[in-house]
Amino acid sequence: MRFAFTAEQLAMRDSVRALLKRECPPARVREAWAAPDGKVPGLWSKLSELGVPGILSPQDEGGLGMTELELVLVAEEAGRFALPEPVTDTAAVAVPLLSDASGSPRTRWLRLLATGEATAAVALDGAPYVLGADTADVLVLQRGDEIHAVERADASLEAHASIDGSRRPFRVGWTGSASTLLLRGPVAKSALVDALDRGAVACAAELVGLARQMIETTVAYVKARHQFGKPVGSFQAVKHHLADAHVAVEMSAPAVYRAAWSLAQRTPDRSLHASTAKALASDAATLAARKALQCHGAIGYAFENDLHLWMKRAWALAASWGDAAWHRERVAGVLLSAGGT
């Protein structure tokens, strides 16, 4: 298979990159860590002007009517800039789930989410916490074979600590009803699999962006840092560390793009590709964080150094939407099942 992104897809990526470079530098991310809502003021509305929340929403519902191929490039940029906004929860998971649903919750929330007038927080497949539940307008939650859209005001929230200051996890108490029900039964189970795949692939793309940023930041640091009269980056051991991280990232990125293509085309093996992508991206970002920290020395973990913003986000996302071990087990199950038929 020969694959390349189109000029239009790359233009969407470049527009988001330009916006985030201007509006979401490390200093703004630091401010978000200290802010009550963990967000960059006004940034979500600017992303909404580009159509980011509604990338996967039909045009007649206020979205762009695009595919996971555009979404994956946007998610990668979100990782590159450690974006403290709910791109994965809202654009990759909640909006497509609502698009597949019917009834009053769909009517009430889909257009609001697709246009960026509202945001969503998501907890599916037994996830113990809901990230950003305190600032989301609607919580998309699973219980058994049902998926519900619950207004934040109708849920009780219990805050928990996070290693990433802009990721605010909450335990949520809620009661479902006919007025909150999105999907149930076999239809809900099928939609849940697709939602988990989209969440995993979007998260994997963020991890690729995080890893690339950590490598680029570290390369710049070891060029500028001198020891024994030479740049640290000229030492062979340092080169090997960064080369190992670079190879891992460049091996994972094509798997992420392939998974996005499989989701967009709804191929039968899309879950296999999604899990492969998430496992590889989690490993690559974790490795990049470790190598970057080693090359920076102790200063890399200091709060005053920007590296910790990407490292801590990478550690958090590596465990989100299924960690590498979970996805490898899922891949093994798919392959063994296929071999036995």
Image (cartoon, helix red, strand yellow):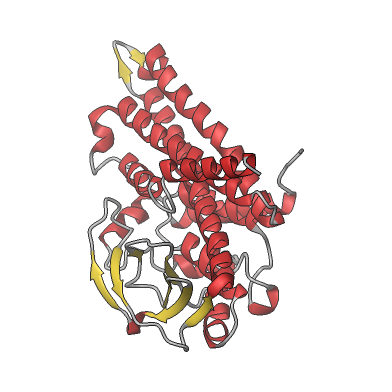
Q: Residue furthest front?
A: 340
Residue drawn at x 56%, y 54% is 74
Quadrant of image for the N terminus: top right
Q: Looking at this view, is 303 or 67 the one in front? A: 67
Residue drawn at x 24%, y 43% is 304
Quadrant of image for the C terminus: top right
Q: Is residue 37 left or right of residue 276?
A: left
The image quadrant of residue 96 is bottom right
The image quadrant of residue 223 is top left
Give how far across and how far down residue 28 sits, in percent. 36, 56
The relative height of residue 111 versus residue 194 in the rendered view (above or below) is: below
**Is residue 18 something one can see in this rendering?**
no
The relative height of residue 125 versus residue 152 in the rendered view (above or below) is: above
Give how far across and how far down residue 4 sits, in percent. 72, 42
Q: Looking at this view, is 187 or 75 the one in front? A: 187
Residue drawn at x 35%, y 49% is 316
Residue drawn at x 50%, y 42% is 208
Give how far across and how far down residue 219 sits, in percent. 43, 28
Q: Is residue 87 left or right of residue 286?
A: right
The relative height of residue 35 versus residue 321 in the rendered view (above or below) is: below
**Is residue 111 something one can see in this rendering?**
yes
Give how far across and how far down residue 8 sits, in percent. 72, 54
Q: Looking at this view, is 307 or 167 the one in front? A: 167
Q: Is residue 141 left or right of residue 92?
A: left
